[in-house]
Amino acid sequence: MTRGICKNRVGERYGSVTVTSRAPNDRSNNARWLVKCDCGNEVTLLANNLKRTKFCGKGCELYTAHKRNDVTGQRFGRLIAVEAVGKKGRHTEWFFNCDCGNEYKGVSTHVISGSVKSCGCLGIQSRIKHGKSHTREYKTERYQAYTNAKRRATPTGVQDREVLEIYKNARNLTKETGVLHEVDHKIPLQGEFVSGLHVAANLQILTRHQNRKKSRSYEI
């Protein structure tokens, strides 16, 4: 252990923590330092432990994010990771947005490994193709045209995070108000004369009632 006087380490950085000042020695006269973590916490660490330090402790938000394998904004098949929502056994559950417009909640390891590639629409569409599905919603030409238009209307290099934030805000509004909110396109993706893009600037949050009742300026 480091005892008594030791090198001044104020301003030095170790992992996500920065040394801010000298702290009183512990009962065994081991040198200690006060550090501030990027998560906002301030803790006291032994001088000998500084070089091995990456986070302020196991309760650190950054440590938790690191341990749960943060995949926010990453794409896996038709799914884009939105946010971690809790634990399921020893695994972390995430919300994902699917290209078809639905949300999927599941264990991230299943999605990362490729075991799950969509909210379920991929399997349904495959069954439709081979005449094995009786799900009316996915059978309609209108629904198929919408999902295809959504893919075509997403420009190369579009910032997925901006789009994801809008879907996240809609979900938060539903939780806060108890009223179902949905994300809709201001200008439809398929219009007779004008077609919109699947980008943040063309998205709006509406209650389900507003979304069903609103009159469109551009008819599909």
Image: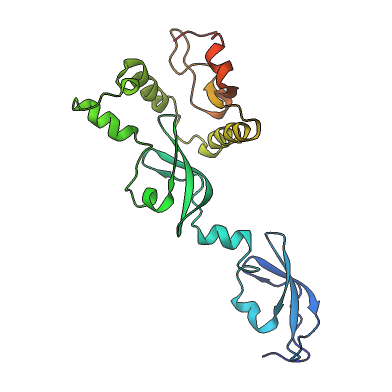
Above or below, 115 relative to 155: below
Above or below, 99 relative to 48: above
Foreground residue, 100 or 149? Answer: 100
Q: Position of residue 33 (x, y in %)?
A: 75, 78
Name the colour scheme.
Answer: rainbow
The residue depicted at 73 percent of the width and 70 percent of the height is 43
Outermost residue to the left: 130
- Is 197 left, or right, of 174 in this rendering? left
Q: Position of residue 181 (x, y in %)?
A: 57, 26
The residue depicted at 32 percent of the width and 17 percent of the height is 140
Foreground residue, 138 or 179? Answer: 179
Q: Position of residue 49 (x, y in %)?
A: 64, 80
Q: State which quarter of the image contains the C terminus.
A: top left
Q: Position of residue 17 (x, y in %)?
A: 67, 67
Above or below, 4 relative to 128: below
Q: Name which quarter of the figure residue 153 lies in.
A: top left
- Is 204 left, or right, of 95 in this rendering? right
Q: Name which quarter of the figure residue 10 lies in.
A: bottom right
- Is 38 left, or right, of 111 in this rendering? right
Q: State which quarter of the image contains the N terminus.
A: bottom right
Q: How many marks?
A: 0
The residue depicted at 33 percent of the width and 48 percent of the height is 114
- Is 71 left, or right, of 147 in this rendering? right
